Amino acid sequence: MTHELRGNGVHCAVTQQGIALLDTRRGRGRWRILDQVGAQLWLEITSGVPEAAAVEELVDHWTRRGIDGSRVRTDLTAVRDELARARLLVAAERAPLPLDPPQIRFATAAPGPLGSRLAAQVGLALALTLLRCTPLRFTIACARAAARLPGRAATVAEAEAIHAAIRRVARAWPGRAACLEESLAAFLACALTGRRARWVLGASLWPQGAHAWIETDGAVVGQAPEDRVWPYVPVLRVERSN
């Protein structure tokens, strides 16, 4: 199999618990979470080991540990075939994992200044238009363009004011604004007011789930109380590169 180069629209986070894959090549993007065994297989194949050889290497590995080899082969072959059908047996852009757990800032109800409320209106309109009308890869490209706008890093207080304004404004919009819409809107609103934040798409490997958020000054902003124990790893970051 010919493996695609990095930057092909597939992103990943590699952890001790497994791998989170985000495929942005189609539609709104697709997530796939691999457990430790599936992660071993994916890493072997995407590093250049032939698919059949990678399967047999892992069968041998687990057989020597007392696991039934035929069952392992069947399970691994099914995983390989599923990844192949999804075109995920390709190299992916790997996100660096944070060295320390982030500081979690819970959502505030503070209304914020008028400038934040106006930016929230525009940011939410842009975010909803992009996410509902364009593929995720185009949305990411637009976010990266916004990250190049001039400005300085937002303080935590400024980012919280923007996020609170987004939530207030979203109540008047039709449809549901979940974490993806809220975080992108906050990221864009910050950029429009000369502030910079980081937009992050991430996943939880156990329990499995996807999430999106903004960060600034080492803090994750605008989270719900149930996220007190932060289970997510970043898979894709959008921020200013210098």
Image: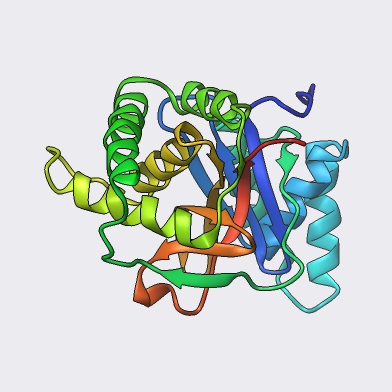
Observer-nearest of 77 and 144:
144
Observer-nearest of 157 and 71:
157
Q: Position of residue 157 (x, y in %)?
A: 47, 62
Above or below 54: residue 71: below
Residue at 66% across, 46% down:
12
Question: Considering the image in quadrants, where does the C terminus appear?
Answer: top right
Q: Position of residue 204 (x, y in %)?
A: 52, 63
Above or below 227: residue 236: above
User: Is residue 103 in view from this perspective?
Assistant: yes
Quadrant of the image occupied by residue 2: top right
Residue at 36% across, 25% down:
130
Residue at 28% across, 64% down:
110
Q: Is residue 235 left or right of residue 93?
A: left
Quadrant of the image occupied by residue 170: top left
Residue at 31% across, 31% down:
122
Quadrant of the image occupied by residue 131: top left
Q: Is residue 177 left or right of residue 52?
A: left
Q: Position of residue 235 (x, y in %)?
A: 62, 49
Observer-nearest of 22 and 134:
134
Q: Position of residue 217 (x, y in %)?
A: 63, 60
User: Is residue 210 in view from this perspective?
Assistant: no
Above or below 104: residue 41: above
